[in-house]
Image (spheres, grey):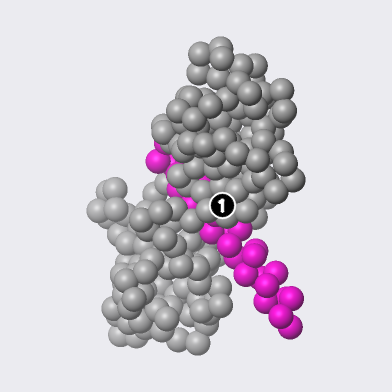
Amino acid sequence: MIKIGDSIRLEPSDGSARQYRSKALAVADGAVHISYPIDEQSGKTVYLLNGMQFKATFVGQDGGLYMFDTEVKGKIRDPLPMVVLAYPGEEYVVRIQRRRYVRVKANVDAAVHPSDSEFAPFVTMTVDISAGGAALLVPPAHAPLLRPGMAVELWLVLAMRSGEYHYVQTKASIVRMADDERGMAKMSVEFTDLAPQDRVRLIRYSFERQLEERKWENEQNK
């Protein structure tokens, strides 16, 4: 899927919002050899240590944006100096929708607060989530007090695959109120004041959930 000459962007898996750009110089079995990456903020060359982990993204031949987990495996000179990244294979590469953030099913712990005392704060969980918005369950007592167009404040707890927890706070606007398949009240919201680093974290969280779903599907089909 990834080809020689493809541009690659690397984002550290530790939650940092920094981005490094590079290019695929060779594709071997289980590895991608890239040029020494450049920090997009400073414009300087970055020297990566073995074992460092990243989310790597590239544009495929179909114009789609793809992402995979990778790790620095070493450095070689053949004849140019290159960094060796682990490549997990096409089955672990996820296509990312660029015009609309991918929404994944996930039960993320959340707290909902009013912007102007319209209702009492409550804790709940999401039904699904993306880097652009979420759907959340609503306690019966609160459902009549919420309506489309209302502004709320959200606190979300993202449990990452690494064991880390990221706490996201953002303003949001209620898009619609509905009932889920169990008859429970559900509200869909759009994030309106999400910090760039939190959007990156939500994209990573969604990506990890996609990988988990794909892994589960592969195990079911064995």
Query: Compared to 136, does 101 lie above or below?
Result: below
Q: Residue at x 66, y 23 (%)?
A: 142
Name the residue at the top extreme: 117
User: If the image is split into quadrants, where does the N terminus sit?
Assistant: bottom left
On whether residue 198 falls in the magenta region, the answer is yes
Location of residue 75 with respect to 176 vertically, above or below: below
Name the main secondary structure of what is drawn in magenta. Answer: helix
Residue at x 56% of width, y 12% of height: 117
Is residue 115 something one can see in this rendering? Answer: yes
19 sits left or right of 116 in the view: left
- Residue 176 location (% of width, % of height): 52, 36
Amino acid marked by disc 1: Tyr
Seen in the picture, residue 219 relative to 162 is either above or below; the reply is: below
Q: Residue at x 57, y 25 (%)?
A: 146
In magenta stretch: residue 65: no
In x, y percent, where is residue 128?
Answer: 60, 48
Q: Which residue is mark 1?
A: 205
Horizontal side of residue 145 vs 21, given as left or right = right
46 relative to 15 in the view: left or right: left
Q: Residues within 10 Å of mark 1 (few under 14, many from 20)?
A: many
Q: Residue at x 53, y 79 (%)?
A: 89
SS state under label 1: helix
| Viewer-nearest residue: 222 or 10 | 222
48 and 8: which is toward the camera: 8
Q: Is residue 167 above or below residue 99?
A: above
Q: Position of residue 215 (x, y in %)?
A: 66, 70
Give the quadrant of residue 109.
Answer: top right
**Name of the residue lying farthest toward the left:** 43
In magenta, the rendered stretch is: 195-222
Provide residue 108's location: percent of width, then percent of height: 65, 43
